Image: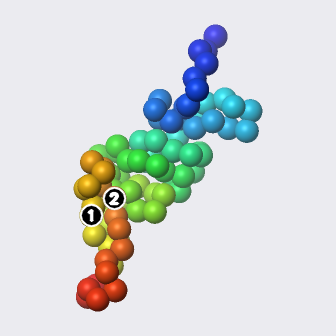
Amino acid sequence: PGSCLSDCTPAGKYANASHVCLDCDETCGTCSGPSSTDCLSCTHATFSFLSGSSCVGSCPNATFVDMQTGAATCLPCHASCAE
């Protein structure tokens, strides 16, 4: 039998409607649901940048990499910057 967790997220899982911990999408490090668009963090070597709630291989145009949280997060560039 499994053990009870107060939060599935640190284990790289999410809690479904029945409060059962299930695996995140393979591109996510941690997640809030089963989809590749439910990522909270990224640990996959190929998809290491968090853009919105998806892990991507590189940040899209008009965004930059922010490392202030210790994770590579894509944030929008200021409106005065050229793409």
The residue labelled by disc 1 is 65
Q: Residue at x 38, y 57 (%)?
A: 50
> Is residue 39 among the parts visible in the rendering?
yes
> Could you say whether the residue bearing mark 2 is in a helix, strand or loop?
strand
Q: Residue at x 61, y 30 (%)?
A: 21
Estimate the x, y position of residue 5 in percent, counting from the top left: 57, 23
Give the color scheme: rainbow, by chain, secondary structure or one colour: rainbow
- Which part of the image, by quadrant, shows the N terminus? top right
* Three-letter residue code for mark 2: Thr
Q: Earlier in the sequence, mark 2 or mark 1?
A: 1
The residue labelled by disc 2 is 73
Question: For the residues marked 2 and 1, what is the alpha-carbon distance in whole angstroms?
Answer: 6 Å
* Three-letter residue code for mark 1: Val
Q: Residue at x 35, y 45 (%)?
A: 44
Estimate the x, y position of residue 81 in percent, counting from the top left: 26, 86
Q: Say left or right for 9 vs 75.
A: right
> Is residue 23 among the parts visible in the rendering?
no
| Residue 61 position (above or below residue 52) | below
Is residue 25 or residue 80 the one in the foreground? Answer: 80
Estimate the x, y position of residue 18 in percent, counting from the top left: 74, 33
